Image (cartoon, rainbow, N blue to C red):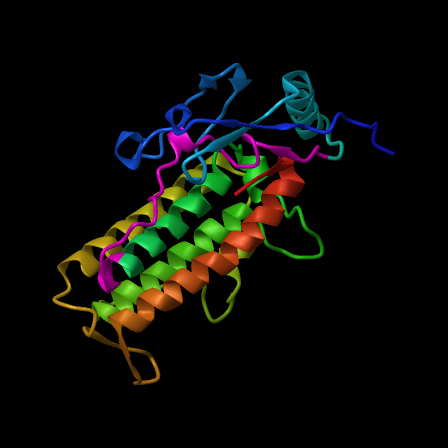
Amino acid sequence: MRPAIRVPIPIWLPASCGSSRSSRARTGVRRRLSCHGVPLTGAGDRVGSRLPVWAGIDESRRMADSRAEAATSGGEPTRTFGWSYLFVHPDDDPRSDGNFADERAVLVEYLRDQRLTFELKCDGLNAEQLARRSVPPSTMSLLGLIRHLAEVERGWFRRTMAGQVAPQRYCSDDDPDGDFDGAVADPTVVDEAYRAWRAEVAFAEQFVSEAADLDVQGRQRDGNVIVLRRLLVHMIEEYARHNGHADLLRERIDGRVGQ
């Protein structure tokens, strides 16, 4: 049984404790900050005009220490937020504030935010943690998801939309689950997976930015036509679903939770 802990009391701070979208890191660089005496890590969801900070700083520090100890000792991780009820601090959040002007911006920016959310959920972990199948009996791992999403981006944007001859990176007819099966705890495998995923995302973003409109067509393997508008909606759904998987995988690895 877990020991009783003090219930945190919400304290509302003015928006000046946070920052506007323009002042946030858009490169995914993480840094450790301190705001009003609360230990901060990483990057998280933008909230409204007021930002909550939880009282009970000693308890927050104790939980963070417990999480780190559990992660290294093989014990059960302690469920811990990065900052307040968020995964990371708003000042470091590379995601948008959601104020989009038109249909194209909505689709492009929502997909970008979903990609960044996935990257945040994988941030700060070593090769063993990324490759850990932390929610058995599922064979999913965060590293497997990085490789899987590289395949998804490659298939839709290079092959379907751009018409390129682009063989699969990890999967084959003999090993259709190669993206997950090959996700082993090797730093070189991790580095390659990140490079592949980022390269495919970069190609996809360039393709979309250069598209004349959302009615640009691509042809699927079965011969059916798909328009860019529908594909962007599908990709938002793809990342949102896998971000749910990433939430659970990350929580079972080191207890890190939050929006």
Residue 170 in view in this figure = no
Of residue 86 and residue 190, the one placed in the foreground of this image is 86
Task: Place residue 171 in its image quadrant.
Answer: bottom left
Q: Residue furthest right?
A: 1
Of residue 116 and residue 59, the one placed in the foreground of this image is 59
Measured from the top left, where is residue 160 in percent x and y? Answer: 28, 71
Q: Which residue: 40% across, 29% down?
A: 15
Q: Which residues are magenta?
A: 77-105
Measured from the top left, where is residue 116 in percent x and y? Answer: 39, 45
Measured from the top left, where is residue 175 in percent x and y? Answer: 52, 65
The question of residue 128 being in magenta is answered with no
Q: In the visual, does 19 lie left or right of 66?
A: left
Q: In the visual, does 207 lie left or right of 231?
A: left
Q: Which residue: 45% across, 66% down?
A: 172
Residue 54 in view in this figure = yes
User: Looking at the rendering, in which quadrant would you find the N terminus?
Assistant: top right
In the image, is residue 143 above or below residue 39?
Answer: below
Of residue 36 and residue 172, the one placed in the foreground of this image is 36
In the image, is residue 167 above or below residue 144?
Answer: below
Q: Which residue: 71% across, 28% down?
A: 70
Measured from the top left, where is residue 39 in percent x and y? Answer: 54, 19
Q: Which residue: 33% across, 51% down?
A: 112
- Is the stretch drawn in magenta largely helix, strand or loop? loop
